[in-house]
Image: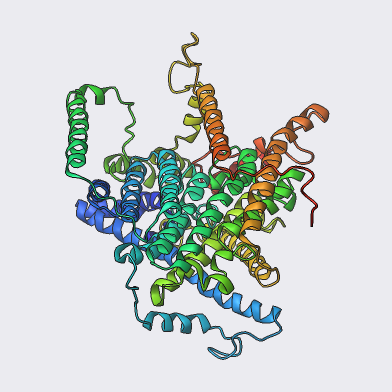
């Protein structure tokens, strides 16, 4: 229930922030609304107990991209508050592309048979513990009367969902202990994402060095003899 | 009834008898919702008390230490001979001031920016454990999350400087942004070294791995973590914009930096955020390098034996665990306060760097040094393993100490005792 409430609060903030980004003309206000929207999306990730994804969203998008954006605006701004006026044609084209994307998303989401998909979910629901009161009540009955620390520990372990960091790290290296490992037919060790990640990061480093090389202050080459004149 | 107040985390609260009783008797979801909101309010209130109480102390300490270093007395009048209530008096004065917005300022962003900085700083307190089990949000990726949350504070500062409509504020914010964004890199790399040794991003695990004597602290794990602590502390000082890296607020050149146009309450919550961040980065340093909530003198291992005792008194509340947690929290806050004292001491004794010197220190010295330390800290156990055929010099390897997640410390301690008895 509280999860539902928080979901609606953050969903409205995320969508409202996104609309406000489009609606405002001032670049810095856009950045502010972008922070609201992206931060709410991170909060939605936390509600889904995808802690790592939420933290990455905060670090990369809110803390990284938006800061870079505002920093870039501050460095390049000619006037005090840069406004970006949009011409009507731009508005029509942008709106058309946006609504097309929305149509594609909605139609693809609508075409999924969710009852069939939810049947494939693991037995223990990944639903957050606060919603799942029935599970809590069942676990309560088992340990409240006995009060043994082990039952309590098991209860705590089942309650704390969202411990995905270790699985993410193993999956990154190609190990998927949650599937196929018991079968022992080689399916357990997929190729992983380590090599693509390294290639992308080296690529980004090359881009960074190239940008620094292009943007650096050009020094004029001074002939040797003319140095010590004075 | 007191079980509700003794619940340490929300998980504990949901598992406590009081919530069970509520579910059985009332059966209504609304009662449960009210209880949940009540519990959440208590937890948030406790954190908020810490968040706003520590800066009050630190501002007093700053004035007192600055006075002593400059051969003055500092505040002496408000609240007795030591000026204990000086910060409270300052706060009352600041709240009474007029809430000004300059004519050229961007009204909405100007008003919102202080809250953005403060919320980012406060959010970092959510994942900061104060003791073994005393943490608001026990996230498994807590260390990653706290670095992400602390990196958001710069956004409020940039927006504040830009929306002020003043060149002093704009210059200050630009320097601030350049400084904070670039110092995040060596800070994260230095924080990565103990995380890699612990093999976890969970502060609980990192803290428990450093239990026992002083030599178990990660700062003494190998020579490179010893250096990494100082590297981290320098970058942390810079990332909370303290002197000698406080040129963004250089009074002699920039009036006051990014908060030139702010006054009254909005100005004061920028300082609330700054002083709270000083505590947050110091507490992270304590957990990552200085043993967390362990005192290093084995006193806490005696007190840890109390965990789980004295539980008959109040339902769902163990007096022994509570005592142990209070003891741990006192040690952690004490250590963090000592680091904050060092930051204050450095501020009033070292001259301020120029902006180019600040950037040179970061990009040409601290980034290569932290990368070198990281690589060497990775290689160190391999070198030890090949030459001495053991991963650590002395004591037990860390892998033997790691405890399974989700098991309360009392159960783990009991298991250890059973192991010892056998």
Spot occupied by residue B390 in the image (x, y as percentages of width and height) = 77, 31
Q: How many discs mark residues in the rendered view?
A: 0
Depth order, front residue of B341/A62: A62
Q: Residue at x 53, y 88 (%)?
A: B79
| Residue A99 rendering spot, x and y as whole percentages | 18, 35
In the displayed orientation, state which residue is furthest to the top: A185
- Give the residue at x 57% y 69%: B250
Near-viewer residue (B84 or A27):
A27
Q: Eyeballing the image, is B366 above or below B117?
A: above
Residue A146 percent coordinates (x, y) = 41, 44
Nearest the eye: B3 or B120: B120
Q: Residue at x 66, y 86 (%)?
A: B73
Position in image of residue B266 (x %, y %): 39, 71
Quadrant of residue B118 within the rendered picture: bottom left
In the visual, does A59 lie left or right of B248? Answer: left
> How did the renderer colour the structure?
rainbow
Lateral position of residue A101 relative to residue A33, left or right: left
Q: Residue at x 62, y 66 (%)?
A: B243
Q: Residue B2: in sight, yes or no?
A: no
Instruction: Check the picture and name the quadrant holding the C terminus of chain A.
Output: bottom right
Rendered position, B198 above or below A177: below
- Residue A99 visible within the image: yes
């Amino acid at each position: 229930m509280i999860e539902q409430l928080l979901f609606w609060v953050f969903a409205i903030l995320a969508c409202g922030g996104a609309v406000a980004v489009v609606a405002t003309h001032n670049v810095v206000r856009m950045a502010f609304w972008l922070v609201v929207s992206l931060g709410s999306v991170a909060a939605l990730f936390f509600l889904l107990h995808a802690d790592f994804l939420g933290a990455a969203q905060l670090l990369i998008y809110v803390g990284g991209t938006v800061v870079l954006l505002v920093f870039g605006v501050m460095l390049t701004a000619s006037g005090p508050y840069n406004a970006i006026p949009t011409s009507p044609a731009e508005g029509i084209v942008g709106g058309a592309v946006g609504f097309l994307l929305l149509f594609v998303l909605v139609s693809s989401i609508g075409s999924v048979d969710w009852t069939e998909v939810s049947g494939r979910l693991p037995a223990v629901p990944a639903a957050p513990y606060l919603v799942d009161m029935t599970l809590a009540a069942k676990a309560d009955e088992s340990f409240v009367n006995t009060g043994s620390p082990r039952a309590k520990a098991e209860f705590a372990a089942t309650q704390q969902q969202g411990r995905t960091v270790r699985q993410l790290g193993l999956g990154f290296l190609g190990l998927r202990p949650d599937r196929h490992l018991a079968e022992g037919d080689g399916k357990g060790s997929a190729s992983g994402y380590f090599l693509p990640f390294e290639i992308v990061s080296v690529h980004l480093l090359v881009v960074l060095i190239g940008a620094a090389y292009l943007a650096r202050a050009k020094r004029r080459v001074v002939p040797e003899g003319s140095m010590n004149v004075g | 009834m007191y079980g509700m107040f003794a619940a340490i985390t929300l998980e504990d609260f949901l598992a406590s008898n009081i919530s069970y009783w509520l579910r059985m008797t009332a059966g209504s979801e609304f009662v449960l919702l009210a209880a949940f909101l009540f519990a959440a309010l208590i937890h948030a209130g406790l954190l908020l008390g810490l968040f706003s109480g520590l800066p009050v102390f630190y501002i007093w300490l700053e004035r007192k230490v600055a006075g002593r270093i400059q051969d003055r007395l500092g505040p002496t009048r408000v609240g007795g001979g030591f000026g204990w209530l000086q910060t409270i008096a300052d706060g009352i004065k600041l709240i009474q001031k007029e809430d000004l917005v300059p004519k050229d300022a961007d009204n909405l962003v100007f008003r919102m920016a202080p809250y953005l900085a403060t919320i980012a700083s406060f959010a970092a307190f959510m994942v900061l454990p104060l003791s073994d089990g005393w943490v608001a949000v026990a996230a498994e990726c807590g260390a990653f999350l706290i670095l992400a949350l602390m990196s958001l504070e710069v956004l409020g500062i940039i927006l504040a400087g830009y929306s002020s409509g003043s060149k002093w504020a704009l210059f200050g914010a630009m320097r601030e942004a350049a400084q904070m964004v670039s110092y995040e890199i060596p800070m994260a790399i230095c924080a990565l070294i103990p995380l890699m040794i612990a093999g976890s991003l969970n502060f609980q695990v990192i803290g428990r791995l450093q239990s026992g004597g002083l030599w178990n602290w990660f700062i003494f794990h190998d020579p490179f973590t010893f250096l990494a602590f100082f590297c981290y502390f320098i970058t942390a000082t810079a990332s909370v914009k303290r002197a000698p890296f406080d040129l963004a607020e250089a009074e002699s050149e920039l009036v006051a930096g990014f908060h030139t146009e702010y006054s009254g309450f909005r100005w004061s919550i920028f300082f609330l955020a700054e002083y709270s961040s000083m505590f947050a980065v110091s507490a992270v340093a304590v957990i990552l390098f200085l043993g967390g909530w362990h005192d290093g003198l084995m006193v806490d291992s005696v007190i840890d034996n109390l965990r789980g005792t004295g539980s008959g008194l109040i339902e769902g509340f163990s007096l022994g665990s509570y005592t142990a947690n209070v003891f741990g929290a006192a040690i952690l806050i004490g250590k963090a306060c000592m680091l904050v004292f060092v930051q204050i001491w450095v501020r009033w004794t070292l001259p301020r760097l120029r902006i180019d010197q600040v950037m040179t220190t970061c990009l040409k010295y601290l980034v290569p040094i932290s990368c070198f330390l990281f690589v060497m800290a990775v290689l160190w156990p391999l070198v030890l393993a090949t030459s001495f055929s053991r991963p650590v010099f002395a004591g037990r390897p860390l892998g033997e100490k790691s405890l399974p997640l989700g098991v309360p410390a009392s159960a783990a301690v009991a298991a250890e005792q059973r192991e010892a008895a056998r």
